[in-house]
């Protein structure tokens, strides 16, 4: 069934209402933008409406990145959740039917055995021949019923197998929707879901997860000097290093642009700090070389922020603390790791993109302001 059930006249009215709103934004008037504003003016997506109202309450515009994030979080994700729910529900229904059929078959077998025994008993004594014929007829009917139920169960098994394949397809589609197309890491939406799931299990007094945010230093210069195709290769290389250094329940994601995050559900702040420094030093040793002669022409470095979760803080506050630590790393020379303190803090000013290339990496600790 189609998601949108509006009539031609209704959809035309929503188009009329959407166009002025879209035109005021910094994003182009493309299908993704239209889908966001269509659902906004139609009033069919309350969480999306609330998010847009918050983002634009002071006259701010929605750019391409924000528009894409809204689409992925409030429109595409809803479809994925619906598909998953339907697939799981259909699977449960088929399981119930299969169990019922198996239960009925067991009862039919038992009933058939009892009738066989009854027929044998009657055959050992003098009885009316008509009674024996009735018993035989009943047995024949029971045998047919057993055969029919067996056939039904086989068909249900086949259907259940097909539904299982469908569920796996839905799972694969959902995984693809949560993956970054360039690097293969989890995307922003996938990270948000992983973080929410992780924080939902944290209880007071327990060790919370740790989080790293990493940003490639002077990435704009890489794109300007060597081209965006080469910049994409750098992003993929950094992603491979991150993926190679995580394990178990850890999640590495591309957070946006040249920024990456690593969620460590079962790692202390000390372990997260050590991992961040290992990743930083590994990337620091990398070099950009010419393909024809192997000559070194540039160096890639990253800056990182690290924090451990404080019980009771929101996911947004947790990410912001780590992001603040990242800004400190940028401001203090780049190519370094900064540990974030617990509790609220003022966001440092963002480092200028035209700073000189960083000196050798070091570790800084932010003191509460």
Image (tube, rainbow, N blue to C red):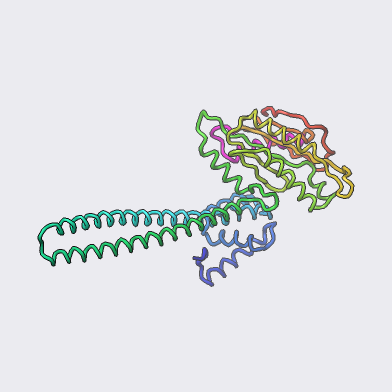
Counting from the top left corner in percent of width and height, residue 114 is at 22, 55
At x 51%, y 37%, the residue is 201
**Most common secondary structure along the magenta stretch:** helix
* Residue at x 56%, y 33% (from the top left corner): 208
Pick the front one: 213 or 88: 88
Q: How many numbered markers are drawn?
A: 0
Quadrant containing the C terminus in the rendered view? top right
Report x, y in % for residue 110.
Answer: 26, 54
The image position of residue 123, as x and y in percent, is 15, 59
Mark yes or no: residue 319 visible: no
Q: Dividing the picture into quarters, in which one does residue 131 lie?
A: bottom left
Please say whether residue 29 is visible from this viewpoint.
yes
* For residue 73, side relative to residue 85 (left or right): right
Residue 315 inside the magenta-drawn segment: yes
Q: Residue 144 in magenta?
A: no
The answer to which image quadrant residue 151 occupies is bottom left
Q: Is residue 318 left or right of residue 227?
A: left
In magenta, the rendered stretch is 309-331
Frontmost residue, 342 versus 213: 213
- Could you tell whether 152 is left or right of 208 in the image? left
Rendered image quadrant of residue 31: bottom right
- Name which residue lies at 14% across and 57% down: 124
Is 225 or 134 nearer to us in this picture? 134
Percent across and percent down for residue 94 are 41, 57
- Which is more toward the observer, 240 or 369? 240
């Amino acid at each position: 069934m189609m998601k949108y059930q509006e009539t031609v006249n209704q959809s035309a009215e929503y188009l009329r209402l959407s166009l002025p709103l879209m035109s005021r934004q910094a994003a182009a008037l493309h299908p993704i933008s239209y889908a966001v504003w269509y659902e906004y003016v139609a009033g069919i997506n309350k969480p999306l409406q609330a998010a847009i109202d918050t983002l634009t309450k002071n006259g701010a515009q929605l750019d391409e990145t924000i528009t894409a994030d809204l689409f992925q979080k409030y429109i595409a994700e809803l479809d994925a959740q619906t598909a998953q729910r339907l697939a799981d529900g259909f699977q449960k229904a088929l399981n119930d039917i299969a169990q019922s059929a198996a239960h009925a078959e067991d009862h039919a077998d038992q009933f058939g055995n009892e009738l066989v025994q009854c027929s044998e008993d009657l055959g050992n004594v003098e009885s009316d021949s008509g009674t024996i014929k009735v018993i035989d007829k009943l047995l024949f009917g029971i045998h047919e019923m057993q055969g029919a139920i067996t056939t039904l169960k086989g068909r249900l098994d086949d259907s259940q197998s097909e539904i299982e394949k469908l569920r796996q397809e839905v799972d694969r589609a959902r995984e693809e929707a949560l993956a970054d197309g360039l690097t293969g890491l989890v995307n922003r939406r996938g990270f948000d879901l992983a973080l929410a799931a992780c924080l939902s299990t944290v209880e007071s007094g327990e060790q919370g997860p740790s989080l790293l945010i990493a940003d490639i230093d002077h990435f704009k210069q890489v794109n300007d000097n060597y081209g965006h195709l080469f910049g994409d290769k750098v992003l993929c290389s950094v992603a491979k290093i991150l993926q190679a250094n995580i394990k178990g329940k850890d999640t590495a994601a591309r957070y946006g642009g040249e920024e990456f995050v690593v969620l460590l559900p079962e790692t202390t702040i000390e372990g997260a700090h050590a991992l961040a420094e290992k990743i930083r030093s590994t990337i620091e040793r990398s070099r950009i070389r010419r393909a024809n002669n192997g000559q070194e022409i540039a160096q890639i470095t990253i800056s990182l922020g690290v924090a451990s979760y404080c019980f009771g803080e929101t996911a947004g506050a947790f990410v912001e603390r780590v992001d603040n630590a990242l800004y400190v790393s940028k401001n203090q020379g780049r190519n370094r790791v900064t540990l974030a303190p617990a509790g609220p803090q003022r966001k440092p000013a963002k480092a200028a993109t035209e700073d000189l290339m960083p000196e050798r990496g070091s570790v800084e600790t932010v003191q509460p302001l």
